[in-house]
Amino acid sequence: MTTFDDREKGFESKYALDQEQEFKAVARRNKLLGLWAAGKMGLSAESADQYASAVVRADFEQPGEEDVYRKIAQDLEGAGLSVSEGEIRRKMDELSSVAREQIRSGE
């Protein structure tokens, strides 16, 4: 095997690890977002955990994060809460950073 082959395998391994970490970070962000929304809706701790899991599952409906945004927005509206799109999207961005840091630090 040549040095080039070794280098290529190293890049492939790093890419696979980065993709795995990003997947975990998105799932963590969705759980944190679900817990945030559950808190706004006044759900109990057990209901909040179930709701957060439902938000994580909602992300598998279609590519991208629009399915998660839509679920959160509809559920908050259904609970009689007025939360702007900007507030939800800012929270998603904020929690993305938190989730990535948690995954990097092994939490």
Image (cartoon, grey):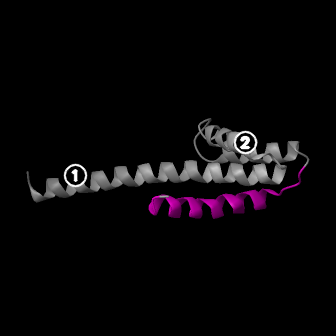
Residues in magenta, as a range: 81-106
**Residue for badge 1:** 9
The 10 Å Cα crowd at callout 1, few under 14, some 14 to 19, many 20 or more, is few
Is disc 2 placed on a helix, strand or loop?
helix
**Residue for badge 2:** 46
**Residue 63 appears at what percent x and percent y?**
57, 41
- Kindly give the residue lying farthest to the right in the view shown: 80
Q: What distance separates the C-alpha of mark 2 from that of mark 1?
A: 44 Å
- Kindly give the residue lying farthest to the top in the view shown: 61
Is disc 1 placed on a helix, strand or loop?
helix
**Residue 37 appears at what percent x and percent y?**
76, 51
- Image point 81% across, 43% down: which residue? 74
The 10 Å Cα crowd at callout 2, few under 14, some 14 to 19, many 20 or more, is few
Q: Is residue 90 part of the magenta span, yes or no?
A: yes
Q: Is residue 102 part of the magenta span, yes or no?
A: yes
Q: Main secondary structure of the magenta part?
A: helix
**Residue 54 appears at what percent x and percent y?**
67, 38
